[in-house]
Amino acid sequence: MIRLRVTFQHAGEGIAIALRALRANPVRATLTTLGIVIGVLTVILMITIIQGLNESFKGQISFLGSGLLFVDKMPWVITDDYFLYRNRPDISVQEYEEVKKHSHLAKTVALSISTGKPLKFRQRSLEQVEISGVSANYTEVITTFPKYGRFISAIDEMRNRKVVVIGSSVADELFEKRNPIGYRISIAGEKYRVIGVLEEQGQFFGHSMDNVAIIPYGALLKDFGKHHWVSIMAEAMDPARIDDLEFELTGIMRRARGLKAGQDNNFAVNKQSMLLNFYNQVTSGVYTVGIVIGGISLLVGGIGIMNIMMVSVTERTREIGIRKAIGAKRINIIWQFLVESAAICMLGGAIGIALAFGISKIIDKFLPTSMPLWVALFGVGFSALVGVFFGLWPAVKAAKLHPIESLRYE
Amino acid sequence: MEAIIEVKELVKTYQVGEVKVEALRGIDMTIDRNEYVAIMGPSGSGKSTLMNIIGCLDTPSTGSYRLHGVNVEEMNDNQLADTRNREIGFVFQTFNLLPRADSFHNVELPLVYAGKTKRERRERAEDALSKVGLGDRMRHKPNELSGGQRQRVAIARALVNNPSIILADEPTGNLDSQTGEEIMEIFRILHTAGNTIILVTHEEYIADHANRIIRLKDGKISGEEWRNVASHNNPLGGAE
């Protein structure tokens, strides 16, 4: 117990000695920490940005429920040759009907057909708006609600009525402060009556989700042709059984398309987790690069620390001799220099974190960032570790000095 | 008299390149508690080497050195450090104070390595500084003090852990003669108070302060003389 207390006392004394030494040479200490500053800055900034993206990505992706599957022509994430997928047949409305009829595991099966068209209201126009032709149960699978008016009804769907629910930015652009409900707008020359305005959705990776117009799918096929991106959306009764649903959908689609055993699927079943996986893949790549850059800076910084500690040991040879003459043990000398090098590195780490914090506030204006407390603590702690690691050799070298020779050193 | 230092057939050889240098060639001596001994000799006589060994800064090549009945030549690094801390108080010719630390911290440092509590360190360091007449200079750094004051700080540092021996190596060598006398007066008082003092010098008038003079030549004791033996019977003698 007494040993432990004494050790702590030595640690405390070591910190006091180290701080005194740092104060004696503040410019040198600051310059020495530059490598550590850059290393910590890189790593912390990287973590801060990715943490921020994570939070906003997970928030944005949540509108695609985790129990939701999409039957599409192609996978969302294509890592091999795009041309392998390009010539697949489009998903058809008949296939949607098949899935709706035969799926037992899906609670809801909805349809969405997407294309891009210009919009016009009187003198005002929009060049390119995402037009979605949907089934009336669309809102059961995608969480989106009209702010004013109503969504497309089963009757609208059945009769292919020319009605439209517009996104909030479309409403702002075409109608300014006017209430759009009841007005007719032109979608590529076809007149549609506005029945609702959607709540603001915000952005999904830079892509505005408010620049949309939603119409019954039958109306879209009739007015704008058949070759568009078609998605069948199926929501699992039990989200835990999403894999079973995927298997069932694949079977229904293969039967509908008359695929024989041995033939590959010529459609894709997509889900939210694919985006998540892809996202995680990209960010882990960015993480790796950041950690490598940060690691190299810390290594260089650490070597700088080792160098300066070597200089410090040589400069203070006589001091070490005096300390040994009056009873300092090796461990006391090691403590003294380790604490000093850890303190220099922690200073660098703290500067790095402060800079990262400042820069992240600037980046925050373009990209979401988030600096959790653990990142700051980790930064300081890791810097201290670097200091201890690179300070060890100089400290041991100091501790091994012979007292007589050190006392004679000029 | 209780023997503090017992040295028998002490030999120290250094290897300097190809050549073997015999710094000490068989020293036998005993120093009792409360003795005031001066070790004299021309340069190269081995007096510094002897002082380093007595001060546990170095170990003998052969022979034995018993300090308080404990064999020093068998000690490891940590034990030597511990012995220096508890048993020896060094006073150097060049003072050897830590330049960036104030008087108080310089004096306190041996107690830090002894693992004393902050409170005890404070009391004892202040006490030691008052004893050498520097109670009002505790927060001064060495470069703010005169040579004599610096040496007094060094003496306070040597005293602070109540060592068995105060080992002074040319303590007046860097001081003018009047300041030197003041320092020697402090040693006299310490001796009267019961401390054991070993002084290394090559000045006769400094050595005159001691009760015994041991003369070294070529690594051997060439002569020994006692003076003022009366003070051996000093009533204060024997106390630590």
Image: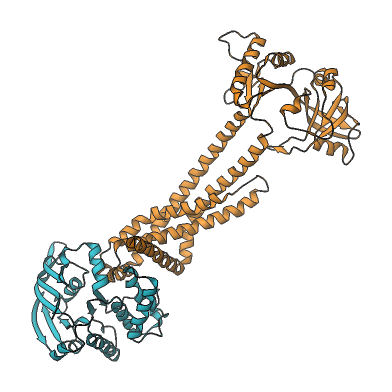
Chain colours: A orange, B cyan
Q: Quarter of the image holding residue B51?
A: bottom left
Q: Is residue A286 visible?
A: yes
User: x%, y% of residue A208?
Assistant: 74, 36
Tell me what residue is drawn at x 61 percent, y 55 percent: A358
Q: Is residue A342 positioned above or below A156 on the image? A: below
Quadrant the N terminus of chain A occupies: bottom left
Q: Is residue A109 left or right of residue A244?
A: right
Q: Is residue A44 left or right of residue B166?
A: right
User: x%, y% of residue A350?
Assistant: 52, 57
User: x%, y% of residue A283?
Assistant: 56, 38
Q: Quarter of the image holding residue B162?
A: bottom left
Query: Going by the picture, which residue comes out furthest to the front?
Result: A1
Count of numbered circles on the image:
0
Q: Quarter of the image holding residue B7?
A: bottom left
Q: Is residue A231 visible?
A: no
Quadrant the C terminus of chain A occupies: bottom left
Tell me what residue is drawn at x 31 percent, y 82 percent: B151
Q: Is residue A222 positioned above or below A240 on the image? A: above
Q: Is residue B231 positioned above or below A296 on the image? A: below
* B226 or A296: nearer the viewer: B226
Q: Is residue A241 positioned above or below B76 on the image? A: above
User: x%, y% of residue B110?
Assistant: 32, 72
